Amino acid sequence: MKLIYIAGPYASDSNWECVENSLRAMAVSRLAVRKGNAPIALHSSILMGGLGDDNLPVEREQGLLVACDMVRLVAGS
């Protein structure tokens, strides 16, 4: 099983486009699950306010960091 970060647009000028972007990310996530992978898609968490307010630049820039207790950097080979 692979852990897959689902990346794609979220922000938009209209709330409906944010919802559409989230729905697309969820559809791709379901496909990843059907193929035996574990997706991480932050779109729905952002949409529901779980990762801060996307309208506030400071919170948007923090992204996932507002939900994490720690960030661990791992050097590549």
Image: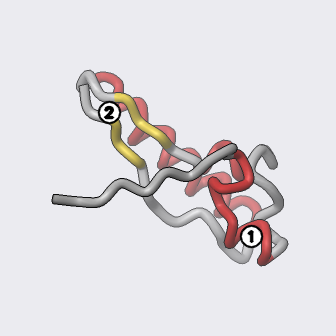
Which element carries disc 1, helix, strand or loop? loop
**Residue drawn at point x = 39 percent, y = 42 percent:** 28
Q: Position of residue 24 (x, y in %)?
A: 48, 48
Colouring chosen for the image of the structure: secondary structure
Task: Indicate the quadrant where residue 45 lies.
Answer: top right
Q: Are marks 2 and 1 in contact (CB under 8 Å)?
A: no
Say whether residue 38 is left or right of residue 67.
left
**Residue drawn at point x = 68 percent, y = 72 percent:** 61
Q: Earlier in the sequence, mark 2 or mark 1?
A: 1
Residue 36 numbered tag: none
Task: Indicate the quadrant where residue 64 lies.
Answer: bottom right
Which residue is most to the left?
77
Which element carries disc 2, helix, strand or loop? helix
Q: Nearer the viewer, residue 53 or 75?
A: 75
Instruction: Count every numbered label the image shows and give the total.
Output: 2
- The quadrant in which the N terminus is found is top left
Which three-letter amino acid code belongs to the residue tagged 2? Ala
Say whether residue 68 is left or right of residue 52.
left
In this figure, which residue is indicated by the disc labeled 2? Answer: 32
Q: Which marked residue is nearer to the observer: mark 2 or mark 1?
A: 2
Q: Position of residue 35 (x, y in %)?
A: 24, 26
CA distance separating discs 2 and 1: 28 Å
Task: Indicate the quadrant where residue 18 lies.
Answer: bottom right
Label 1 packing within 10 angstroms: few (<14), some (14-19), many (20+)? few
Which three-letter amino acid code belongs to the residue tagged 1? Ser
**Is residue 34 positioned above or below 13 on the image?**
above
Label 2 packing within 10 angstroms: few (<14), some (14-19), many (20+)? some
Residue 14 numbered tag: 1
Q: Position of residue 52 (x, y in %)?
A: 80, 56
- The quadrant in which the C terminus is found is bottom left
